[in-house]
Amino acid sequence: MRLAVKNYLNGNGATRLKKAFSMIEMALAMGVVSFAMVSLLGLIPVGLKMTRDTMDITVQSQIMQSISNDVQLTEYDKLQDLNDLNYNAEGLKEEDASKRVFWADLITSGSASTVKAPATTIDEIRARVIQVKIYRNNQTRPIYETSFLIANTRGTEGM
C-alpha cells in the first residue's frame, strides 16, 4: 500500500508517496503469526511425552538385558533368589533403594518342573518360568511386563 506523506524536512511541504504497512495489515500479520505460535506451543507437551516414552523404552531394554545376564549367571537352583532389583535413570543397577528410579520384580515359578523335550536327545529338561515386571518408582502398575522360560539343560540330576 502506498501512503501520501508530506515532507516537512526540506521545508517545501511537498507531498510524496511512501511505502508502508497499514494498521490492518499489521493486525492480520500478527494474527497469523500468533496462530502459528499457539500451534507450535501445543506440540511441546506431545514431544516431551514422546521423549519420555522413548527414554523409558531404552531403559527397559537395558534393564531386561541386565536381568537376562543375571539369570544366565545365576545357578539354576538359586533363580528364586533374584527379585526386587533396583535401577537408576540410565537402567544401571543401583544398590541403594532410596536412589532407584526403576525397579524390577522377578517372580519364578514355585518349583522346577520337568518337561518332556520333543525332538531332542534329552528325555526331560528342568524348566522354570520367570515373570518380570518393571516399575517406575512410586508406581503400582508395571510399565513393562514379560515372562520367559529358563531351562536347565545340564541334565536332570538332583531332581
Image: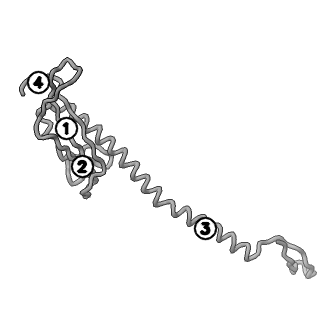
Q: Which label sits in the foreground, 3 or 4?
A: 4
Q: Is 21 situated above or below 55? A: below
Residue hosting label 4: 156
Label whose residue precedes the other's in the sequence (4 or 1): 1
Say which mark, if any, is on residue 14. none
Residue hosting label 3: 35
Quadrant location of the N terminus in the rendered image: bottom right
Identify the amino acid type marked 1.
Answer: Val
Label whose residue precedes the other's in the sequence (3 or 2): 3
Identify the amino acid type marked 3.
Answer: Phe
Residue hosting label 1: 129
| SS category of the residue bearing label 4 | loop
Residue hosting label 2: 103
Q: Say few, some or many: other residues with alpha carbon within 10 Å of mark 3 (under 14 / 14 to 19 / 20 or more).
A: few
Identify the amino acid type marked 2.
Answer: Trp
- Residue 101 visible in the snapshot: no
